[in-house]
């Protein structure tokens, strides 16, 4: 798993960063992962527009690598700001639109 730094992900001067709880996962989650929010329980998990559990809506960007684990974990996420598109994992056109609606915009110049 590559480890991106905050400055490799965030391209703007106005990020809104918060701590959110990630659901347990059998897979490691890389920095730059697009996140959705599970409707039942409100935990964040990898965005997946094929699901129908809340994670089908992109809501945030994970800012640091999180290892696999059997328990939920607190993590820093970006809720608003300008990001480097190429640093993101799991982004599709629908997710990009949803993130833009929430104030997370892509900087393709970086």
Image (tube, rainbow, N blue to C red):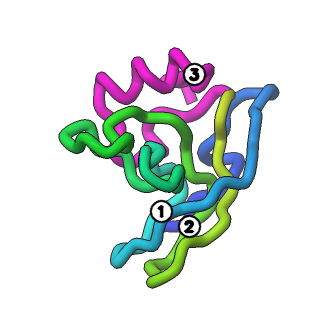
First in sequence: mark 1 vs mark 2? 1
Q: Which residue lies furthest to the bottom in this view?
A: 70
Q: Residue 16 placed where, x, y %?
A: 76, 34
Which circle's residue, 3 or 2, is located before the other in the chain? 2
Is any part of residue 1 visible from this angle? Answer: no
Q: Position of residue 101 (x, y in %)?
A: 52, 15
Other-residue count near label 3 (Cα within 10 Å), few / some / many at <14 / 14–19 / ≥20: some
Q: Name the residue under label 2.
A: 65
Q: Taking 71 as reference, is 17 above or below it?
A: above
From the viewer's perspective, is residue 12 above or below residue 56? above
Residue 28 occupies which quadrant of the picture?
Answer: bottom left
Q: Magenta includes 52?
A: no
Alpha carbon separation for disc pair 1 and 2: 4 Å
Please report the residue visible at 69 percent of the width from the left and 51 percent of the height from the top.
6
Point out residue 4 in the picture as x, y percentages from the top left corner: 58, 59
Query: Which residue, given by chain and number where applicable, does mark 1 sit on?
Result: 30
Residue 105 visible in this rendered orientation of the protein: yes
> Horizontal and vertical percent for residue 23?
48, 65
Magenta span of residues? 81-110
The residue beneath circle 3 is 102
User: Within 10 Å of the Cα at label 2, are there few (<14), some (14-19), or many (20+) other Cα atoms?
Assistant: some
Q: Which of marks 1 and 3 is nearer the N terminus?
A: 1
Count of numbered badges drawn on the protein: 3
Q: Which one is in front, 4 or 16? A: 16
Q: Measure the alpha-carbon separation of dots 3 and 2.
A: 22 Å
**Horizontal arrangement in the rendering, residue 95 relative to residue 66 (left or right):** left
89 is within the stretch colored magenta: yes
- Tag 2 secondary structure: loop
Residue drawn at the location 62% of the way across and 53% of the way down = 63
Residue at image location 40% in from the left, 25% down from the top? 96
Q: Nearer the viewer, mark 3 or mark 2?
A: 3
Which of the 4 image quadrants contains residue 94? Answer: top left
């Amino acid at each position: 798993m590559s480890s991106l730094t905050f400055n490799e992900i965030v391209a703007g001067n106005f990020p809104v960063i918060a701590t959110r709880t990630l659901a347990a996962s059998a897979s490691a989650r890389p920095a730059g992962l697009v996140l959705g929010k599970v409707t039942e329980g409100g935990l964040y998990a990898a965005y997946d527009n094929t699901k129908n559990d809340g994670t089908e809506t992109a809501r945030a960007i994970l800012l640091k690598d999180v290892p696999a684990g059997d328990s939920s974990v607190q993590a820093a996420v970006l809720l608003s700001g300008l990001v480097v598109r190429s640093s993101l994992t799991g982004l599709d056109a629908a997710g990009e639109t949803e993130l833009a609606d929430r104030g997370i915009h892509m900087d393709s110049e970086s």
